[in-house]
Image (cartoon, rainbow, N blue to C red):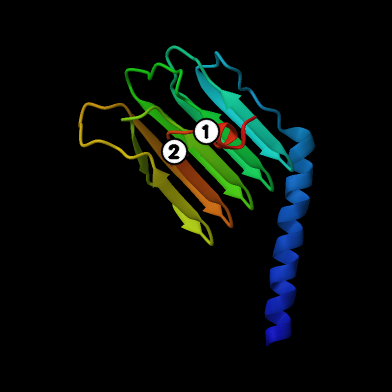
Amino acid sequence: MFRFIFKTIRLAFLTMLGTALVAKFMLKSNAGAETQEIDLVTIFGGENLVSSADPFYGGKILTMCGGTVLDLRKVTPAPTGIYLDVLLWMGGVDLVVPLGWRVDFTGKVLFGGFNDATQTTADPDAPMVRIGGIILCGGLRATTKSPLEVVGR
C-alpha cells in the first residue's frame, strides 16, 4: 500500500515538474513598471517588479519553483480596486503595499501559507488589495517593507 502511495506521489511530482519546464519556455511575462494589468510569470528563477502604474487594476501572478517580489507602493489603485489572481507552486511571493492599505486573501492554500504583515488600520476607506487563487507548497506574504530593502539591494 505504501509503495503505491509513494509511486503516485512521485508520479504527480514529476508531472508537475515537467509541466513547469514546458511552461518556462511557453509563458512570458507581460509586466512592467507602467503596466496597468500585469501577467507576471516566474518559473525556476526570481522576479522583482516595482510598479508605478496609474491606475493599477491588478492581474495574474504565476510562480513555480521561484520567488517574486511585487512592490505596489508607487501605484494608484484603480477605482474598481486591485485584484490579484495567484498560482504559487513551490515558490514564494512578497507583496509590498503602502502603509495603511488593507489586504484580503480569499484563495485556497494546500501545504503552504499566507501571512498578512501589513499592520493594517481599521479605516474602511483605505485601499484594498484582493487576492485569490491557489497556493501549493509555497507562501505569500503581504508586507509594507520590501525584503530587498532589508538585505540592502
Kindly identify the residue that appears in the image at 70 percent across and 72 percent down: 8
The C terminus - image quarter? top right
Q: Position of residue 101 (x, y in %)?
A: 33, 30
User: Number of numbered discs present?
Assistant: 2
For label 2, the residue is 143
Q: Is residue 79 visible?
A: yes
**In the shown orientation, is residue 116 left or right of residue 64?**
left
The N terminus - image quarter? bottom right
Query: Which residue is at the far bottom?
Result: 1
Label 2: few (<14), some or many (≥20) within 10 Å?
A: many
Say what secondary structure mark 1 lies in. Answer: loop
Q: Position of residue 50 (x, y in %)?
A: 56, 22
Say what secondary structure mark 2 lies in. Answer: strand
**In the shown orientation, is residue 97 left or right of residue 139?**
left
**In the shown orientation, is residue 101 left or right of residue 5?**
left
State the image quarter where residue 147 is shown.
Answer: top right
Vertical arrangement, residue 127 with respect to residue 3, above or below: above
Kindly identify the residue that appears in the image at 71 percent across and 77 percent down: 6
Q: Position of residue 127 (x, y in %)?
A: 31, 26
Residue situated in front as seen by the camera: 124 or 17: 124
Kindly identify the residue that appears in the image at 39 percent across and 27 percent down: 98
**In the shown orientation, is residue 23 left or right of residue 48?**
right
Label 2 sits on what residue type?
Thr
Tell me the tag on residue 146: 1
User: Whole-Å distance between the Cαs marked 2 and 1?
Assistant: 7 Å
Q: Do labels 2 and 1 touch, CB within 8 Å?
A: yes
Kindly identify the residue that appears in the image at 59 percent across and 33 percent down: 148
Label 1 sits on what residue type?
Ser
Residue situated in front as seen by the camera: 83 or 119: 119
Q: Is residue 107 visible?
A: no
Vertical arrangement, residue 68 with respect to residue 9, above or below: above
